[in-house]
Image: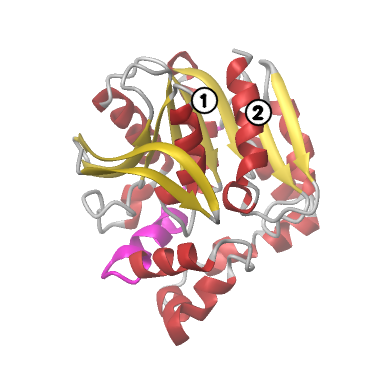
């Protein structure tokens, strides 16, 4: 544990409790993480997306810890300086799912609840599909089941247009474009829905040498050839109507990819940045889901 602080303020919301700062050693390298709650609390792992970091979950981690859970949110592969391989091929789904299991092993968690947003949601879906025995529950935020998204990309023109950015960002010029003019393009992604101080922190981190390339390598890595299976673990899927990247076709199709208990929550007039735009709403849904299983 690198340090701790008593309480925190997230977007003007004061949360009680102690936040821990962890270094989690694995074979791939050392992951930085934030954590809260008793060491013997029910374990919850929270995975962030692009272009964020573990602190996107700061509010949820603090509240979960205050409720007696042991909540841990790592800076994922490429975002943790200690796990920043140079080759794009080292950011494939197999490696990302492997990181989830390696972090759980390092924390001595045999079974845990998994939560993911954006890219973290995709990794969470893959983990639930391939290793259901390790998960107590799954919560996916914004990101539909990859099978549902794949179907939408084949059949829905709207989703095809929304996902064009994923192809564009594979260009070698993307880093320069995103960081130009004080990272104007990077800042604009957050649609003024994330506190400016938090956006400043994301920009600071991604401006470090190699950091943005590592984050973009998630898009440049070769995608897995295997077809993802349906998910059997109890699943909560939270999607918002103003998500610019992920449309309703894949969101509504996701229920067909879950065989276990399933809850779909649609948030009206909320953007893609659910964990930080409406942290209380998401946390209440998460706690309700966790308490049911």
Q: Is residue 241 left or right of residue 187?
A: right
Q: Looking at the picture, how far across and down is residue 27, in whole percent?
A: 19, 35
Q: Looking at the picture, how far across and down is residue 267, in whole percent?
A: 76, 44
Q: Secondary structure at mark 1?
A: helix
> What stretch of residues is rendered in magenta?
206-227
Q: Which label belongs to residue 236?
A: 2
- Choose between 63 and 135: the one closer to the eye: 63
The structure residue drawn at horizontal position 63% and vertical position 62%, both measured from the top left corner, is: 193
Q: Is residue 31 above or below residue 243?
A: above
The structure residue drawn at horizontal position 40% and vertical position 65%, both measured from the top left corner, is: 201
The structure residue drawn at horizontal position 76% and vertical position 56%, both measured from the top left corner, is: 242
Q: In this rendering, does residue 78 appear at all?
A: yes
- Choose between 13 and 235: the one closer to the eye: 13
Q: Quadrant of the N terminus?
A: top left
Place residue 203 in its image quadrant.
Answer: bottom left
Q: Is residue 145 magenta?
A: no
Q: Is residue 172 above or below residue 7?
A: below
Q: Is residue 242 above or below residue 74?
A: below
Residue with the mark numbered 1: 128
- Choose between 289 and 62: the one closer to the eye: 62
Q: How many marks?
A: 2
Q: Looking at the picture, how far across and down is residue 159, in whole percent?
A: 73, 55
Q: Secondary structure at mark 2?
A: strand
- Choose between 159 and 280: the one closer to the eye: 280
The structure residue drawn at horizontal position 68% and vertical position 38%, both measured from the top left corner, is: 238
């Amino acid at each position: 544990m690198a340090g701790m602080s008593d309480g925190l303020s997230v977007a003007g919301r004061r949360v009680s409790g102690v936040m821990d700062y962890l270094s989690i050693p694995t074979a791939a390298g050392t992951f930085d993480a934030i954590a809260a709650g008793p060491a013997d609390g029910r374990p919850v792992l929270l995975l962030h997306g692009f272009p964020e970091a573990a602190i996107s979950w700061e509010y949820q981690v603090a509240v979960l810890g205050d409720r007696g859970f042991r909540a841990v949110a790592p800076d994922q592969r490429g975002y943790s300086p200690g796990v920043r391989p140079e080759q794009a091929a080292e950011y494939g789904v197999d490696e990302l799912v492997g990181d989830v299991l390696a972090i759980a092993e390092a924390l001595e968690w045999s079974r845990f609840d998994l939560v993911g947003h954006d890219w973290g949601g995709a990794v969470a879906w893959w983990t639930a599909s391939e290793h259901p025995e390790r998960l107590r529950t799954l919560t996916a935020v914004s990101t539909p089941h990859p099978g549902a998204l794949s179907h939408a990309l084949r059949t829905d023109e709207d989703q095809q247009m929304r996902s064009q950015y994923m192809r564009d960002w594979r260009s070698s010029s993307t880093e320069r474009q995103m960081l130009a003019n004080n990272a104007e393009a990077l800042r604009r992604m957050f649609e003024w829905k994330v506190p400016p101080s938090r956006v400043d922190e994301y920009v600071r981190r991604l401006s470090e040498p190699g950091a943005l390339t590592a984050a973009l390598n998630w898009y440049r890595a070769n995608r897995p050839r295997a077809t993802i299976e349906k998910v059997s673990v109890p699943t909560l899927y939270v999607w918002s109507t103003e998500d610019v990247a992920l449309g309703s076709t894949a969101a509504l199709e996701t229920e067909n990819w879950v065989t276990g208990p399933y809850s779909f929550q649609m948030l009206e007039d909320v953007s893609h940045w659910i964990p930080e735009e409406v942290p209380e709403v998401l946390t209440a849904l998460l706690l309700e889901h966790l308490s049911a299983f």
